[in-house]
Image (cartoon, rainbow, N blue to C red):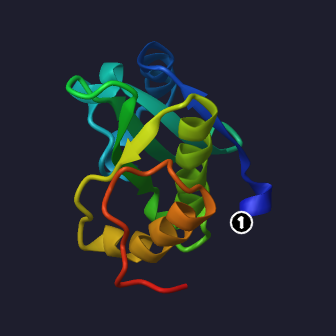
Amino acid sequence: MKLSDITNIKILDGQDMYKLVEKNPTVFSRIRYLVFSEISREIHFVAFDKKKIIAVGGLEESPYEKDILWIKHISVDPDYQGQRIATSIMERFYQYAMDNNKKLKHSSFTKQGQRLKPIVHRFDQKYPGVSIDEPLRDFVT
């Protein structure tokens, strides 16, 4: 499967995501950081292979800071990892924030998520002013 074969990433609110996971009951066993109890609070960026959910990224509006979106998670089905799907979702986060006059705030990176640090650094440079986090200076691309 090539990234070009994957349906465009769709942006869904919590209510639409609840409906979608009802049709994809195996999603919680395949998509690691998607948490049922948090679905309603997140803006979801969902990648599909036909009708199968293969990756989900989540943003959440900060309840403490105006116009701030927290990057909550990006999870890719293990069968689809290594195909730049997480990178595509991350770029959609930046585009969405820019288009909606919002700022992004990163959470901590899991051990597996460490691979995204150089990508975040690249997007911080490509979309200046979108991220409010300290630049990731350790990574030069």
Rendered image quadrant of residue 25: top left
Q: Residue 15, image x and y in percent?
A: 44, 13
Residue 72 vs 101, above or below: the answer is below
Left or right of 10 on screen, residue 140: left
Rendered image quadrant of residue 134: bottom left
Q: Residue at x 55, y 63 (%)?
A: 123
Q: Which residue is mark 1?
A: 1
Is residue 100 visible in the rendered structure shown here?
A: yes
Q: Residue 104, image x and y in percent?
A: 41, 44
Left or right of 108 on screen, residue 24: right
For label 1, the SS is: loop
Left or right of 46 on screen, residue 71: left
Residue 83 vs 90, above or below: the answer is below
- Choose between 133 and 42: the one closer to the eye: 133
Please state which amino acid type lies under the numbered disc 1. Answer: Met
- If the image is split into quadrants, where does the N terminus sit? bottom right
Q: Residue at x 42, y 83 (%)?
A: 139
